Image (cartoon, rainbow, N blue to C red):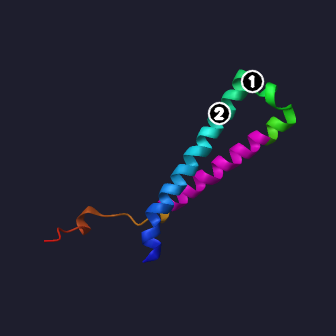
Amino acid sequence: MPAVQGAPRFDRVVRQWSDLAERRLKHYTELYRSGRWQLYYTQEQFRLRMQDVIRAVKIWRELAERHRLEQPAVRDDALRPAA
């Protein structure tokens, strides 16, 4: 049962990295909207960074969704009191 024991930890890790990727996307989106990106990057550099950020968000969203779908659903009627 190691897979079952590691599932909550994996879920937490995926959630944390997914949240970080989302925050990073939000930050780069704000840089773009405000025009501040021009202070730090050339147009080509920023385009490449933004592609990387978007790719990371897609990967973490996919991992989170795949993990969520792989988890067996816990049914309330299957649970019984211990005593």
In the displayed structure, does residue 73 sit left or right of residue 18?
left
In the displayed structure, does residue 25 sit left or right of residue 51?
left
- State the CA–CA distance, disc 1 to disc 2: 11 Å
Q: Amino acid at mark 2?
A: His
- What SS does tag 2 mark? helix
Examine the structure image and report whether residue 51 is included in the region drawn in magenta. yes
Magenta stretch, main secondary structure class: helix
> What residue is shown with label 2?
27
Q: Residue at x 26, y 62 (%)?
A: 76
Q: In the picture, which quadrant includes the C terminus?
A: bottom left
Proximity of marks 1 and 2: CB atoms separated by less than 8 Å: no
Image coords of residue 30 (percent x, y): 66, 28
- What SS does tag 1 mark? loop
Categorize mark 2 by other alpha carbons within 10 Å: few (<14), some (14-19), many (20+). Answer: few
Q: Amino acid at mark 1?
A: Arg
Q: Nearer the viewer, residue 19 or 69?
A: 19
Image coords of residue 49 (percent x, y): 77, 41
Magenta residues span 49-68
Q: Quadrant of residue 34?
A: top right
Q: Residue at x 17, y 68 (%)?
A: 81
Image coords of residue 52 (percent x, y): 74, 46
Q: Residue at x 69, y 44 (%)?
A: 54
Image coords of residue 63 (percent x, y): 58, 58
Q: Residue at x 70, y 24 (%)?
A: 33
Label annotation for residue 36 = 1
Categorize mark 1 by other alpha carbons within 10 Å: few (<14), some (14-19), many (20+). Answer: few
Q: Residue furthest top?
A: 34
Q: Nearer the viewer, residue 80 or 8?
A: 8
